[in-house]
Amino acid sequence: MLLRVRVTLPDRPGTLGQVARTLGVSGADIVQVVVLERLGGRAVDDFTVVWPGAARVERLLAGLAAIPGVRVDGVWRAIGAPTTTGQDAELLAQIAANPTDGVATLVDAVPGLLAADWAVAAVVPLDWASRDGGGTATVGQASWRAPQPPRLPEVTPLRARSLTDADGTHYAVAPFGRAGLVLVVAREHTEPLTAAAFHSTEVDRLAQLVRAGAVILGDRLDLVGVPPVTTIT
């Protein structure tokens, strides 16, 4: 199976090589490395690896924990192939080519781009701020892996951010800036794996995709979550 391994490590020569060797010795075949952050002598790296299904993840965690200064932030199953340059542009091109299904296309694609489990486009009432405890979001569009009904976090106020629920599920949310629509992406907690929270660079990426999608779709966003009109003849 394909795993995403997020590691915080000292940003000095040799440490990355130690992590890569440990992954290999543990049985992981590295297919991609993405640097999420380099700050204050520390780095946050995402490794996408092919992991033998019969192997125990505990062996991998123990090996990484033995490297001085290394911390494992999360290990979780990745959906689809590793991300490559140009995927975001390709997704926006697909939305522009078929705007009628634009929101559905975005919702279905985002979990694969962000190594998440599922996503939904939720509609928040425009008067949520005047209600006690905020408004209740409803689902306008859901990806194929989304639970029924999806477990939605408190998505207000509508600004791009990450948050974690009490059950350990991690969310990233980003508003479309129109019609009370917000995109919610989730990584679920599934033993023995523990997903990492969405990094700020992932939240920024999601926000950029949502903003660009909103520009492309325009007035069509007003129709998300609106029941279809049936004609009686």
Image (spheres, rainbow, N blue to C red):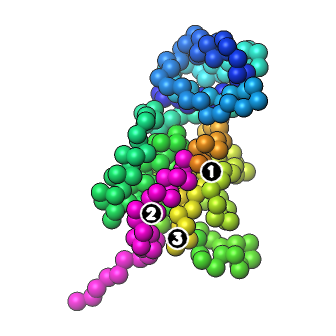
Q: Would residue 125 be found to the left or right of residue 40 on screen? A: left
Q: Examine the residues drawn in magenta and state their main secondary structure.
A: helix
Residue that lies at the very extreme toward the left in this rendered image: 233
Q: How many numbered circles are shown?
A: 3
Q: What number is the disc on residue 171? A: 1
Q: Secondary structure at mark 3?
A: loop
Q: Position of residue 120 (x, y in %)?
A: 51, 58
The amino acid type, in three-letter code, at marker 3 is Arg
Q: Would residue 232 be found to the left or right of residue 48 on screen? A: left
Mark 2 or mark 3, which is nearer to you? 2
| Residue lying at 75% horizontally and 25% vertically, measured from the top left | 41
Can I make out residue 165 in this image? yes
Residue bearing the label numbered 2: 215
Residue bearing the label numbered 3: 178
Does 130 sit above or below residue 20?
below
| Residue lying at 41% horizontally and 41% vertically, measured from the top left | 87
Q: Is residue 211 magenta?
A: yes
